[in-house]
Image (cartoon, rainbow, N blue to C red):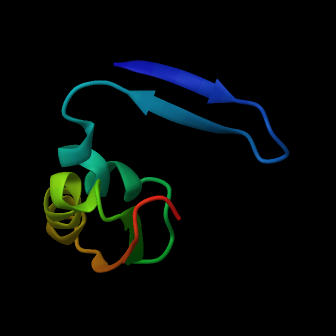
Amino acid sequence: MRTLDVHTGVPYQVLIGDGLLREAGSRCLEVLHGRKVMIVSDQRVAPLYLEEGSRAFEEAGFQVFSFTFPEGE
């Protein structure tokens, strides 16, 4: 896994590596104060990753909402 530091007004890290989607919920427990998440995706990407991402957050105890918008928007 690689970590990319992004230096903005509010710095943050981006994690790059295999299997991170399955770990998304447990990793976010460390940094999120609430227990509700919104997954936003387009119609092309959602069928590939929305189910697995939602499951990862639900298993970590989050309430998951999603919004899918048309491709190209």
Q: Is 2 placed left or right of 11 in the picture?
A: left
Image coords of residue 4 (percent x, y): 56, 23
Q: Most extreme residue toward the right, as rendered?
A: 9
Where the N terminus falls, by quadrant? top left
- Residue farthest along the front direction in this orientation: 72
Q: Is residue 63 above or below residue 43?
A: below
Side (left or right) of 22 relative to 63: left
Instruction: Indicate the quadrant where residue 15 lies.
Output: top left
Q: Residue at x 80, y 39 (%)?
A: 8
- x then y, percent, for residue 55: 14, 65
In the rendered picture of this protein, how many numbered marks are placed on residues? 0
Question: Residue 71: x, y in percent?
Answer: 40, 61
The structure residue drawn at horizontal position 25% and vertical position 65%, both measured from the top left corner, is: 57
The correct choice, above or below, for 28 with respect to 63 in the image is above
> Does 22 sit left or right of 6 as displayed?
left
In the image, 68 versus 16, the foreground residue is 68
| Whole-percent x, y for residue 38 in the image | 41, 74
Residue lying at 29% horizontally and 78% vertically, measured from the top left: 64
Q: Residue furthest top?
A: 2
Q: Answer above or below: position of 32 versus 13.
A: below
